[in-house]
Image (spheres, rainbow, N blue to C red):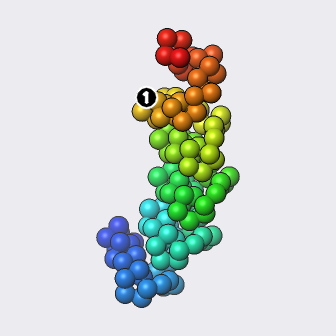
Amino acid sequence: MNTTAKDLYQSYLYARDVIGGRWPEAEAAIAKDWYWAYAYASDVIRGRWPEAEATIAKDPHSAYPYVRDVIGGRWPEAEATIATDPGRAYEYAKDVIGGRWPEAEATIATDPVAAKLYLEAFPEAKLEWVMNGWLDWFDL
């Protein structure tokens, strides 16, 4: 099977819209692409897809939505990856953990928008952020 992005998209659509379910012949190719693996698990399988989780866990832009839309709870195997992206790390803390995520705060602090949203959601982190040099005293 040819595995260009267009072919993966067509395979995903065929499984979702024509078959209305899994297409085993295409799964090996789809499982190699983090974006289409997430979409296939979410929209076609409508559940976890263990065979593709190693691929999905490699990119924060698929790992976080997979957690949010498919797993519905923490996914320790992907947390190191999610923690590399400030925006996704903030969303994971807010939507999945439901509280502060100290392991990702250094990354979140590097992005002004993610940092602002995180500190609005978890104001109790402000003093620690000041102590770490991520926030100015005047911003308390």
Q: Nearer the viewer, residue 34 or 104?
A: 104
Quarter holding the N terminus is bottom left
Measured as percent of width and height from the top left, residue 95 is found at 56, 49
Is 21 located above or below residue 98 in the figure? below
Q: Secondary structure at mark 1?
A: helix
Measured as percent of width and height from the top left, residue 98 is found at 62, 45
Residue at position x 47%, y 35% from top? 117
Q: Nearer the viewer, residue 42 or 25?
A: 42
Amino acid type at circle 1 is Pro
Decide if residue 64 is in sight here. yes
Residue that protrudes farthest toward the top in the picture: 138
Is 87 located above or below residue 46 in the figure? above
Residue 65 relative to residue 5: left or right: right
Is 74 located above or below residue 11 in the figure? above
Measured as percent of width and height from the top left, residue 110 is found at 48, 29
Residue 111 relative to residue 80: left or right: left
Q: How many marks?
A: 1
Residue at position x 49%, y 38% from top? 86
Label 1, residues with CA under 10 Å away: few <14, some 14-19, many ≥20: few
Residue at position x 62%, y 19% from top? 127
Residue position for label 1: 112
Residue 67 relative to residue 12: left or right: right
Is 99 located above or below residue 69 in the figure? above
| The quadrant where residue 75 appears | bottom right
Decide if residue 111 is in sight here. no
Residue at position x 49%, y 65% from top? 38
Measured as percent of width and height from the top left, residue 32 is found at 50, 67
Residue that protrudes farthest toward the left in the picture: 6
Residue that protrudes farthest toward the right in the picture: 76
